Image (cartoon, rainbow, N blue to C red):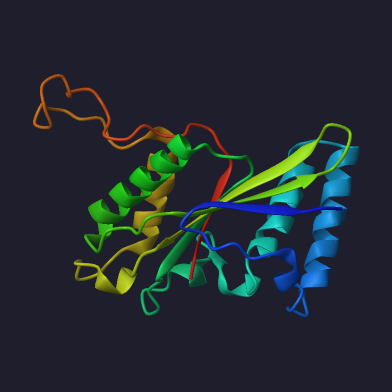
Amino acid sequence: MPIDCKTVSNCETVSPSERTASSDYSEVLRRFELAIAAYKAQADPLTLLLLNKSAIPLMDAQPHTWQSIDDPAALDPEQPFTAIRAVCDQRLSDAQVGQLTGCLGYALQAILAGPELSLPNVAYLEAPTGSGIQAAFTLVEFAYDARLSGRTAPDYVEALAKAREFIRDGTPIRTTNKAGAGTQGTRLVEGLGAVRLSLYVR
């Protein structure tokens, strides 16, 4: 089954042949193929979730270094993260990646008052499965050094919870026209809506 890893923005292409250097890659690929077969046989939320989770390790030669933000250990104040990854189980357009970046950066600045979020590195994983079913994922990575937060007691949990909220709903609605005439009642960045997206840090 061919797997095509396509990249845009600042993402470096890593070919499937390079990934085979990892002793675990063949097992990761086998699990991904099984997930594709299950989704092909019965496309429902459960098999889609399995497909999503199985695809994530294919995007990284060291899959175990990334931790879901739902894992309490991932947001340990004693071990600040230096990178953020967003994985979406659909292909995002350039405009949507821009919205994701703007909302994430807004949340981090509002809660952590740290450095600017880096430009996004974007990769697409596409796996033709036959019968007209195309499994597609978007992976977006950012450099962000949480150690440089300007807060005395930075709340990483709150920052990434806000990031999720803003990515879905958009940045807060402006209550004044300080940003310019007619901006009251608008958002700086619109949200993506109800897309299935997972966040990871390391």
Q: Is residue 76 above or below residue 33?
A: below
Image location of residue 170, percent across then percent down = 36, 35
Q: Residue at x 68, y 43 (%)?
A: 136
Left or right of residue 31: residue 54: left
Q: Residue at x 78, y 66 (%)?
A: 28
Depth check, front residue: 12 or 139:
12
Instruction: Give the side of residue 88 with respect to residue 104, left or right.
Output: right
Quarter-of-image position of residue 147: bottom left
On screen, residue 149 versus residue 25, left or right, reads left
Question: Which residue is at the far top?
Answer: 182
Which image quadrant is residue 66 in?
bottom right
In the image, residue 201 above or below residue 164? below
Judging depth in this view, the residue of 93 and 155 nearest the camera is: 93
Residue at 10%, 21% (x, y): give it.
Answer: 181
Q: Position of residue 116 (x, y in %)?
A: 27, 59
- Residue 105 is situated, as x and y percent measured from the top left of the image, at 32, 51
User: Up-down: is 141 above or below 186?
Assistant: below
Relative to 52, does residue 66 appear above or below in the rendering? below
Q: Is residue 69 left or right of residue 148?
A: right
User: In this view of the protein, which residue sits in the foreground, 7 or 132?
Assistant: 7
Q: How many labels does the image show?
A: 0
| x and y percentages locating residue 154 in the rendered image | 27, 66
User: Which residue is at a point 38% across and 41% down the rendered structure image?
Assistant: 166
